[in-house]
Amino acid sequence: MAGQDETSAPIMPYATDYYAEFYDLWNGSFWPPQWKDIVLYWDAIQSLIASCKHGQETGTINVVDIGCGTGRLLKDLLERSQDHATPLPNVRFYGVDRSETMLRRGEAFLQAHPDLQKIAPVEWVNVSGEKFTSVLPQLKGSSDLVAWTGGGFSHIDTEENQLLFLNQMAGALRSQSSVGMILVLDQSIPSRATDPATSEVFEVPWEGQSIEKPDLTYHKSVNDVFWKGPLRYDCWTISVRNAKNGEEVHMERIEHTLLNLDEENWPGLVKRAGLKISRVQEVEGLGLCYYLQKLP
């Protein structure tokens, strides 16, 4: 087909500019502009700021967003600061993701919004969550909040690799009062994945128009889903087409995995990393947010 740029072999999500825009549009179709979990991270940051004001902690407050993608959490936090006229003094954000394409999109958004950029500095870092302190050694023992939002933690497809990340988190947290937060979606928690609606929103076909290139439309197929033990595989295609004549200009076949949380062994895995579960917060319609802190 003339002008077609086809990737026929399955590729990891988040790798192309097409996918990055599709991801934002697709997610925006079923998630609200500010996800329900934003309040949890906002409150955690405000508690850290209050601790500094009362002399319990000093210096820069380092907030690390693991698996940040295009910066959904960071954008929401900065917009919330602006909307509520609430500054974020001494806060420094780090957006960490293994996809350079997604990071580039997040960075471009903030560059186009200097009013948000000046609220707090953001550093974008291309590395996986299992290795982030190796690229950012300055965060070892100096991170005040390390968060993995949006259910991305479940993309780590073995408990051994999940432990690698938890070890990274434990090594990064500054003190026993510092906080790690991991949101696990209901669809990855066996005892909560009883409603088919918790996952079908991700599985159904979808289409939408490009904002950056209005002459293009995105078309997502229905997911093929299969399981290997606790590991869920999702496979689908994204077709990018000319809006006027329907000609396909790009196609990707996507595969990704989600590992079900082993609810019985999860506390022990956390403990092996030198952490403890300090509390669990339900996020209605999303999942459970686990608050982790360093063991004494």
Image (cartoon, grey):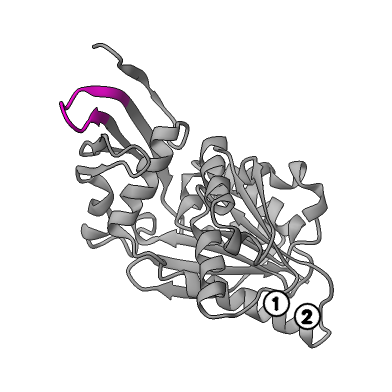
Where residue 186 appears, as percent x and y from the top left, is: 36, 61
Residue at far left of view: 245
Mark 1: few/some/many CA within 10 Å (<14, 14-19, 20+): many
Where residue 80 appears, as percent x and y from the top left, is: 51, 73
Q: Is residue 4 visible?
A: yes
* Amino acid type for the residue under numbered disc 2: Cys
Compare residues 25 and 289 and report the one nearer the observer: 25
In the image, is residue 12 part of the stretch drawn in magenta? Answer: no
Compare residues 130 and 143 and report the one nearer the observer: 143
Please tell me whether mark 2 sits on a helix, a strand or a loop: helix
In the image, is residue 245 part of the stretch drawn in magenta? Answer: yes
Where residue 16 appears, as percent x and y from the top left, is: 45, 31
Q: Quadrant of residue 229?
A: top left
The answer to the question of whether label 2 and label 1 lie on touching residues, with beta carbons closer than 8 A, is yes
Where residue 204 appears, as percent x and y from the top left, is: 20, 46
Instruction: State whether residue 54 is above or below residue 127.
Output: below
User: Residue 52: which disc?
Assistant: 2
